[in-house]
Image: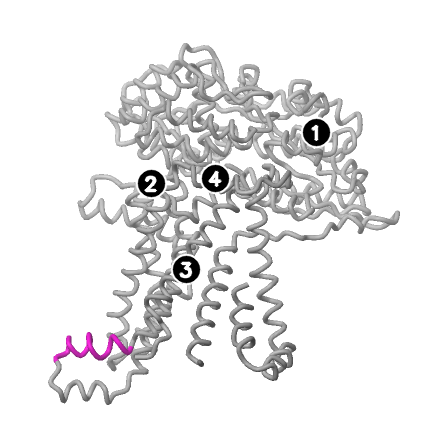
Amino acid sequence: MSVSTAQKRPAKRKSAREGASFLAALPWIGPALLLIFTIVVFPAGYMIYNSTRKISQVGTDLKGVGFDNFAKVFADPNLPRILLNTVVWVVVVVTLTVVISLALAQFLNKPFPGRTLVRMAVIVPWAASVVMTTTVFYYAMDPNYGIFNKFLTDIGLLDEGFGFTKNAVPAMAVAIVIAVFVSIPFTTYTILAGLQAIPGETLEAARVDGAGRWRTYISVILPQLRGALAVAVLINIINVFNNLPILKIITGSIPGYSADTLMTYIFKVLQFDRRLDISSALSVVNFAIVLVIVAIYVKTVKPMKEV
Amino acid sequence: MKKRNLRGAVVAGAAAAALLLTSCGFGGGGGTSDGGSSGSAGAVTTLDMLVPSYSDGTKALWEKVIKDFEAANSDVKVNLEMQSWENIEGVLKTKIQGNKAPDIYNGGAFAEFAAEGLLAPVTDVASEATVADFQPSFADNEKVDGTQYGLPLIASARALFYNKTLMKEAGITDVPKTWDELYTASKAISDKTKSDGYGMPLGNEEAQGESMIWFAGNGGNFGTGTAIEVDTPANLEAADFMQKMIKDGVTQKDPGATQRTPMLNTFIQGKLGFAYALPQTIGQIKTENPDLEYGVAPVATKTGTPATLGVADRLMSFKNDGSKAASVKKFMDYFFSADVYTNWVSTEGFLPTTKSGGEKLAGDETLKPFLDMLPSAVFYPTTNPAWNATDGAFKSLMGQIATGKSAADVLKEIQAKADAAK
């Protein structure tokens, strides 16, 4: 939807001749538009449609109920805790990821022997399947046979294995560590690309003017990283907000909803309550939240503004 | 101007990415019906079969049944799809939504499918002789409004498994028969040995089963085919006692997040005093730790009167356009013939539901303690259309009694979910 308005806007403002050239371009952009329609617009539309229906537990569409499902969603006593969890989850993961990646990118930007190897090693968590990585962590944290628990008991920190993934708060912390771990490669490489695009003259000029290292970083390097950081933060927010595999594996066995984010809650409503209609309504809310975050972000940070 | 366009494109791109990511839960609608392929006589009919795995050997067992069946019936092909118990109902729902319901399905709950007219009555998909061979008590469990929709595949019951070595170490001589005895014995093992006393799996794999065993031990259940009744005084008393076991530390750690399979592995390794387990556990112990000194006894109940959870799973057939009923009938008649069926059931370690199968397995010693318990078994109210939601509510909520929420609140919450599903 938003895709087509974005393309219409310039077409409307410009002359009719240019409008005709848009038509002429259609055969070339047509396949892409078709793809976007079938895998993005149609499913989203279907989801919104489902959120206004009453759907039986086995999946047959019974009748339209207007906004009843949304009323149920907002009256849900579990929602405040879930939204709080979601905010903590997104803010902590994205902040930690960006801070660690900034440091890591700075390090990888300096020439040193074996840099290529280290750069390749940083990609590994990205290359491995998230489900696989998370499962490895999950087993390592198991209280009875997890290698991590065994290590902690062997060095005497714990008397016996602790259920890191069995209680809401520690499980959330473990999930955050894993999410940061798998988000770092992409973020680091985006920032690294930004660092390499900084002209040497600006750094030299800062040095000539007598700026210290820290001052150079804050006033010269960081502003020039704006574009790279904007992309990294935006993609990370959307990705982390919508993350299911990590949370489902790590916090999935915890009873109740004390460790759920909006995404895992949607999944539980679908899997255990079998409410396709309610989970569709929740998904619409989820989607609206992401759109609002992105809109606020684009409006305030102005990622495309040149320095 | 150019800058504006770029910004517009970023917004649009981000919106598209957000859509793409938020909508990834969408499970393929708009699928087409593939019922037309079985038209002419002599053509090969393909049956889609969706089954869960009961054990590591389930797939091979079904593959053998299908291979032998196809060898005898060249006009029918069976397309086998295996899923884990955790995923199978989600997969099924997606298939129903896409008009690709399986022709043969092995599952637990079936009443809601029958209520919506999706299932074929057994008389359409099995011969009279096959239908008449089921034991009446099981066949009755498969009926909605007098019509039988399911072909009972397996029966099972839970029993108390106890570790003799740990009991001796803790100075316990008698196998517990009542709740209080189980409490005392578990406490002794927890205190005097390095192992945990009682294993209580309230994670989302077994919460409903474990709860039912305890509720049944106090004369309770989950309700009937017409009304789900979870929040009752008898059930609450049982739930309170479960919570007491957890609070006093006579169970393993974090029962609310414990799954049955890994927990039974610790029993098999000899690190758990007591646990409720299944007939298959005996086979597992035989292969994985044959030296384990253990015994099997009836479930401990409040007063000592026998009660246990009985489970029956069934095969059912989704109607679709009805063109494959004759082929499904061939398969069912073949599968439930005494030799094929008893081999399947006994290899999986379950109890048979057919008369001919029962006669064939009567002398099996492994199955005897469980066969004895079947008369006192309480079943899930699977014919209640709200059962699926109740089952889901137990799986996601019951474990909260281990994280500090009061048992009364938890039962109320489960009851509310069941009531909302009507």
| Secondary structure state at the residue bearing disc 1 | loop
Q: Of the numbered discs in the image, which one, if any, rests on residue B393?
A: none
Which of the numbered marks, if any, corresponds to residue A71?
A: 4
What's the distance in space between the residues labelled 3 and 2, CA to CA?
Answer: 25 Å
Q: Is residue B48 visible?
A: yes
Q: Nearer the viewer, mark 3 or mark 2?
A: 3
Helix, strand or loop at mark 4: helix
Say which chain tag 3 marks: A
Residue B86 appears in the rendering: no
**Left/right of residue A255 with respect to residue A44 in the rendered view:** left
For the residues labelled 3 and 1, the Cα–Cα distance comes to 45 Å
**Residues indicated by labels 4 and 3 sit on the same polypeptide chain:** yes
Magenta residues?
A212-224
Q: Amino acid at mark 3?
A: Asn
Q: Are marks 4 and 1 in contact (CB under 8 Å)?
A: no
In space, the residues marked 2 and 4 are separated at their CA atoms by 32 Å
| Membership of A43 in magenta stretch | no
Residue at mark 2? A166
- Residue at the spot of label 3: A239
Residue under label 1, please give it.
Answer: B149
Are circles 2 and 4 on residues that touch, CB within 8 Å?
no
